[in-house]
Amino acid sequence: MPMAVISAPLDWVEFVSDLRLPPKADRRLQDLMDHNTEGKLTAEEVTDLEFLVELSQTLSLARAKALHLLGRSPK
């Protein structure tokens, strides 16, 4: 199946290439991963961890695509 081509303004692609989890969410993700390694997560924390991992992966994929379009490597 052919890939769809979507044009976007360069500043949008630049913006996407800089996307990251906010610092507070990144710290929460790190804390949850540490607790998970220790086997100390509650059911609510498991849900939070799954959400933050999925969000982080989605942002990483969007960044990677934007960086590819810009001809750059991740920093």
Image (cartoon, grey):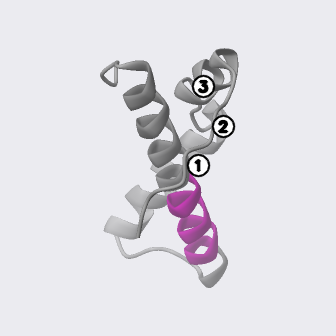
Snapshot quadrant of residue 68? top left
| Kind of residue indicated by mark 2 | Lys
Foreground of the two, 9 or 5: 5
| Residue for point 67% across, 30% down | 8
The quarter of the image holding the N terminus is bottom left
| Kind of residue indicated by mark 3 | Val
Residue 28's disc is 1
Residue bearing the label numbered 2: 24
- Describe the element under mark 3 as helix, strand or loop: helix
Foreground of the two, 61 or 70: 70
Q: Is residue 10 left or right of residue 40?
A: right
Mark 2 and mark 3: Cα distance apart in space: 24 Å
Residue 63's disc is none
Horizontal and vertical percent position of residue 24: 66, 37
Depicted 58 relative to depicted 68: above or below: below
Horizontal and vertical percent position of residue 39: 37, 76
Residue 13's disc is 3
Q: Residues within 10 Å of mark 1 (few under 14, many from 20)?
A: some
| Kind of residue indicated by mark 1 | Arg
